[in-house]
Image (spheres, rainbow, N blue to C red):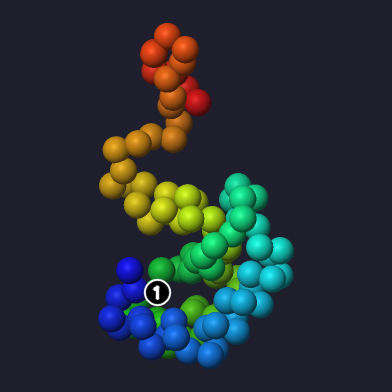
């Protein structure tokens, strides 16, 4: 969900052009898992203080193309009840993934 203070930026022509060019440059693939990319993520999270600084908000050095799953992990993993380093084996025992 886009925060109210960020809506103007994400609707801007500058962001849309930057996002689309970055997406194409990365061939539409998630930079973490190579699945189809969906979201151009800011590695430095945007805040009301830095969103209007193009050296942060539009700088390709601070962007990353992610699929929905990797983006969710980035933003919500610390709140998740699911761990990604373990799984259940055929006996139902918890083992390292």
Q: In this view, does 37 lie to the left or right of 44?
A: right
Where residue 7 sits: x, y (%)?
36, 83
Q: Residue at x 49, y 51 (%)?
A: 70
Q: Residue at x 62, y 77 (%)?
A: 20
Q: Is residue 38 left or right of residue 51?
A: right
Question: Above or below — where is 27 with respect to 4?
Answer: above
Q: Which residue is drawn at 36% across and 47% down?
A: 77
Q: Residue at x 39, y 13 (%)?
A: 93
Q: Is residue 37 left or right of residue 77?
A: right
Q: Count residues near mark 1 (Cα–Cα under 10 Å), then give few for <14, some for 14-19, many for 20+.
A: some
- Residue pointed to by mark 1: 46
Question: Above or below — where is 82 with respect to 79?
Answer: above
- Asked whether residue 29 is in view, the answer is yes
23 or 32: nearer the eye? 23
Quadrant for the N terminus, please. Answer: bottom left
- Asked whether residue 55 is in view, the answer is no
Question: Above or below — where is 30 with respect to 96?
Answer: below
Where residue 56 sits: x, y (%)?
50, 78
| Secondary structure at numbered mark 1 | loop
Q: How many marks?
A: 1
Where residue 29 sits: x, y (%)?
65, 57
Query: Residue 47 occupies which quadrant of the picture?
Result: bottom left
């Amino acid at each position: 969900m886009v925060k109210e203070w960020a809506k103007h930026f994400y609707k801007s022509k500058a962001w849309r052009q930057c996002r689309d060019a970055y997406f194409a440059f990365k061939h539409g693939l998630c930079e973490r898992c190579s699945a189809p990319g969906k979201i151009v993520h800011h590695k430095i999270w945007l805040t009301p203080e830095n969103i209007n600084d193009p050296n942060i908000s539009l700088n390709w050095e601070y962007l990353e193309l992610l699929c929905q799953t990797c983006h969710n992990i980035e933003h919500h993993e610390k709140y998740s009840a699911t761990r990604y380093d373990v799984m259940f084996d055929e006996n139902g025992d918890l083992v390292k993934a």
